[in-house]
Image: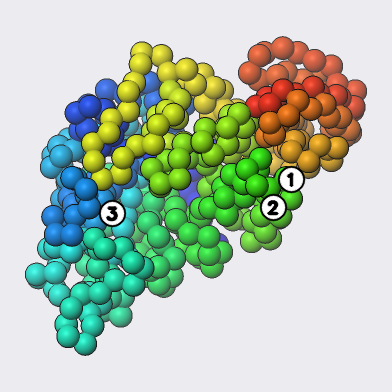
Amino acid sequence: MPFKTIDWALRANIYEVNVRQYTKEGTLTSFALHLPRLADMGVTVLWFMPITPISIKGRLGTLGSYYACSDYTSINSEFGTEQDFIAVVHAAHTLGMKVMIDWVANHTGQDHVWTRSNPNFYMQDSHGNFTERNGWSDVIDLNYDNQHMRTAMINAMRYWVDTAGIDGFRCDMAHLVPLDFWIEARQSLDSIKPLYWLAECEDARYFEAFDTTYAWAFMHASGSINRYEPSLNPVMEQLERYASEGANTQKLFFTSNHDENSWNGTEYEKYGPAAKPWAVFAHTWKGMPLMYSGQELPNTKRLQFFDTDPIHWNSTPALHDFYKTLFQLRKDYSSIVYGDTFILPSSDHNVMAYIRHHQGQVVLVVLNVSKEHVTIQCNHDLLKGHFKQVFSGMQYPFDGYVSFELMPGDYFVYIKS
């Protein structure tokens, strides 16, 4: 990758914020009340789904899609004001968190301000009608052959860096936008302030512009286990493909996000008892972990996408400490971020066992992603010494050979002490 990832992002984790559904008020100000809790949990980066206003024309549902923007340099009035967003960014920074925003560069809503001021910024048919090539009824495609549009897009992105002091971009459907635009955008904006760049795509070429790309294919492969796939072979094959993309590439691992939750179901619908083991995987494999709004509750409902459907919070989310432990592990152990990975052979095809090792640090992860009670044995020279189970705090002596009995949904993480 020609760009260097900013240092603060190397051990980071990302928490996706769905402002509309986060509180019953659905505002930035009400979300801000959760910032101390999120900081205590160990969140380091907040990713806000699009904060821009939503087009009226072609709107889906009552409130429309976040991803049908009507003005790149304004705030959705449902969420509050620009000053409210600036205040949230400042409060997050004060608590040690970074802020990135969702950027939708492939298309806009049907009544975006550019449709009136610069209609030539859009793809048009022979009759001069705006067009869209992906079958999304509420948006229209931008024309990347128009250099003036490219410049205006970069200026709009710069607006939020200059005005609010954001720290990065999550770029929606990045592969639908020409790669050379993203390179141009990053060169321009990183010259103002070094940023973190996340691409929603699986195209390895986009590492030329981005720090991290999505692991969609892994998520689909892992979701097939116990539903119609009898073994972990598709998962392991996908992980090998990611490794082949290069030592300096990074994938985003997750068990839920706004698309998955709303359209395909919660992680509990998808994974059943393996939801927590797969979450442990996302935080201990080489890559960047993502957590979605409400997963710490845990949230077990699909959130409506185009209408109000608030998360129902309680005073003590049941998985707060679970995620806090995983976030702290990533912060404290370089082996999770930089380490070599040794996959341990297992007689059971639905148990993942692997070691992360770096400069003497050893982390052992054992995950039962099946619906069965299993017993496995692990044997490796690195498994010698005293190890602590991070979730229980219990200490165990390992002599290179260790046996585990796991119930469905069990997950063990051991660190060499």
- Would you say the residues marked 1 and 3 are in contact, meaning their CB atoms lie under 8 Å apart? no
Q: CA distance from mark 1 to mark 3?
A: 36 Å
The tag earlier along the polypeptide, 3 or 2, is 3
Q: Which residue is the site of mark 3?
A: 67
As drawn, is 389 to the left or to the right of 210? right
Residues at marks 1 and 2 touching, judged by CB atoms closer than 8 Å: yes
Q: Amino acid at mark 1?
A: Ser
Q: CA distance from mark 1 to mark 2?
A: 8 Å
Give the residue drawn at x 30%, y 80%.
Answer: 145
Q: Position of residue 336 (x, y in %)?
A: 64, 37
What residue is pinned by disc 1? 231
Q: Which residue is mark 2?
A: 234
Q: Amino acid at mark 3?
A: Tyr
Q: Is residue 61 visible?
A: yes
Q: How many marks?
A: 3
Above or below 118: residue 316: above
* Structural crowding at the residue carrying mark 1, measured as other residues with C-alpha within 10 Å and reported as few (<14), some (14–19) or many (≥20): some
Give the alpha-carbon distance from disc 3 to disc 2, as whole Å: 32 Å
Q: Earlier in the sequence, mark 1 or mark 3?
A: 3
Residue 90 appears in view: no
Check disc 1 and report its element: helix, strand or loop.
Answer: loop
